[in-house]
Image (tube, rainbow, N blue to C red):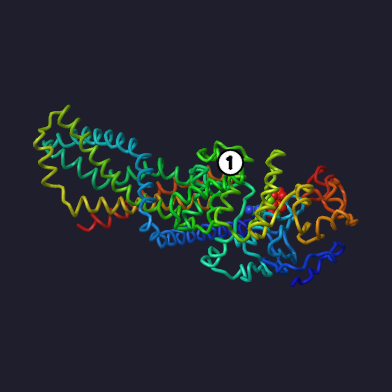
Amino acid sequence: MGMTRTALMQLGTSVLAGLERLGRAHLLLLATLCASDEVLRRPRLVLEQVFNIGTLSLVIVGVSGLFVGMVLGLQGYTVLAKFGAAESLGILVAASLVRELGPVVTALLVAGRAGSALTAEIGLMKATEQLAALEMMAVDPIRRILAPRLLGGLISMPLLAAIFSAVGVVGGYFVGVGLLGVDAGAYWGQMQARIDVQEDLVNGVIKSLVFGLVVTSVALFQGYEAVPTAEGVSRATTRAVVQSALLVLGLDFILTALMFGGD
Amino acid sequence: MFAEPPVNPDSGASSKESHAEPLVEIRDLCFRRGDQLIFADLNLDLPCGLVTAVMGPSGSGKTTLLKLITGQLKPDAGSIRVAGEEITRLDQQGLFRLRRRMGMLFQSSALLTDLSVFDNVAYPLREHTRLSPSLIRKLVLLKLEAVGLRGAWSLMPSELSGGMARRVALARAIALDPMMILYDEPFTGQDPISMGMLMALIRKLNDAARLTSILVSHDVQETLRIADWIYLIAEGRVLAQGTPAALTRDPSPWVRQFLDGLPDGPVHFHYPAPPLAKDLLGWG
Ligand SMILES: Nc1ncnc2c1ncn2[C@@H]1O[C@H](COP(=O)(O)OP(=O)(O)OP(=O)(O)O)[C@@H](O)[C@H]1O
Ligand SMILES: [Mg+2]
């Protein structure tokens, strides 16, 4: 009896603590978004962050895109060839990339590469009292440090996803047309005719924007709330990657259901 | 003028210089961290234009006091007035307005690690003034010259020694010519020459610019030499206060133990704990 009671109490405490954290995360996100007008006055701050996040992730996103596209070409061909529809390879590769793999895989890669770096950076700034020093200089770290990074992440994510998809389409072309002998005209022609701007491109970009918001804000929150020690920062970094990966996959399902589930 | 602090058993209060208005008035301040009571009814005045030192054992809450004065922490009870404004009731804008006129030297120096020495010192100037780049350059070099580090302007914080980083942080703290500077352990990690230079600088800044300085330090001799007024705090209260001359003559065991560095006496060197034997002999 007593044991169940303590177990229940512990459960309750941790649920409450989790909810409180969730609330704090949303408050921080709100405060950061409200502080984004700073960015209009200093667009350079955001450009710097786009550059940072972009350079951190460009190579890994490009290389992954190439391989994912090549695998898609190979797998797609074996399935399509069974039904004698190998010339539809282009549309299969492109639609998979633009709708799904581009936004999702890019988000996972950015979370691991740039998101973790953001968490570590903010966490260390907290641990070494740089955030407190900014506040003492009457500079709001949410405006000056967090807001530009959030916007930088928001802008970089669709760009990186576009690069991923483009490189992937080329990878699919190498394998499908170059190695397996699909007709090059069919590969590009089908793709051009059947990829819909609203249905595929816009939805892909919306997904990327949502993932960009999620990945960057989780990374920033984890850094900002990190226990200000070496161990605390390293834990926060791990947490940021795990949480944003799970959130991206979960949200991807919801978004896909909303966008493509109706018809 | 000065409200007489209630906890003031045997210090040289009679020789108190009463010509200065307090810039900071702390009344009945209570602050706790978890279960640990750090300040219990602390009363303290920091007179305008003087160097006031706060001394006390490690962990007695000196850094915490500076954070309370600058509004980085909120007290549980009591009032803190800075330049006539109640810090505890200011919103962020009000706090920022006040902090533009305060400089703080952090115990950990807290330089921005992605900026060079020059950019660190220029940061508050670029942030809060519209001065031309050439004027900013001149000001920054002058501030760096004052702390003896003009030659190091292009280094990154990771290339500085601890003592140098602290001096850069001091240059940054005085960049905007504040009305008040809070020094958290400025002498730690300084060689005798930079120590002497820092002491002279603190004094000079205070006298030439009519600054108010709050100095937190363990270095008894140095502090006795440059402070106008000294508070000894321990166990959350002011144990003694007075001019350096009065305190050096003070016979009370508290004051003697701290100033002469005696290991045992009325002030406890140890963080509160159960008796050692009990801790060592088991969990009972
Ligand atoms: N972030 C924190 N969380 C919990 N307790 C803290 C925190 N910071 C300080 N403390 C506690 O507050 C007390 C006072 O700390 P503070 O840093 O003000 O001491 P101090 O007088 O500046 O010491 P020192 O001379 O060593 O710098 C310490 O006993 C410490 O245990
Ligand atoms: Mg301290």
Q: Residue at x 71, y 55 (%)?
A: B61
Query: Image check: A160 left or right of B262?
Result: left
Closer to us: B245 or B254: B245
Closer to us: A43 or A215: A43
- Disc 1 on helix, strand or loop? loop
| Residue A3 higher or lower than A231, as above or below | below
User: What amino acid is found at the position of numbered circle 1 in the picture?
Assistant: Leu
Quadrant in the picture for the N terminus of chain B: bottom right
Q: Position of residue A249 (x, y in %)?
A: 36, 48
Question: In the rendered image, is residue B41 in sight?
Answer: yes
Task: Give residue B41's quadrant in the image.
Answer: bottom right
Q: Residue at x 55, y 36 (%)?
A: B159
Q: Position of residue A3 (x, y in %)?
A: 63, 56
Q: Position of residue B228 (x, y in %)?
A: 76, 58
Q: Numbered disc 1: what chain? A: B
Residue at which label 1 appears: B149
Query: Image check: A168 left or right of B49?
Result: left
Question: In the rendered image, is residue A127 in sight?
Answer: no
Q: Residue at x 13, y 37 (%)?
A: A187
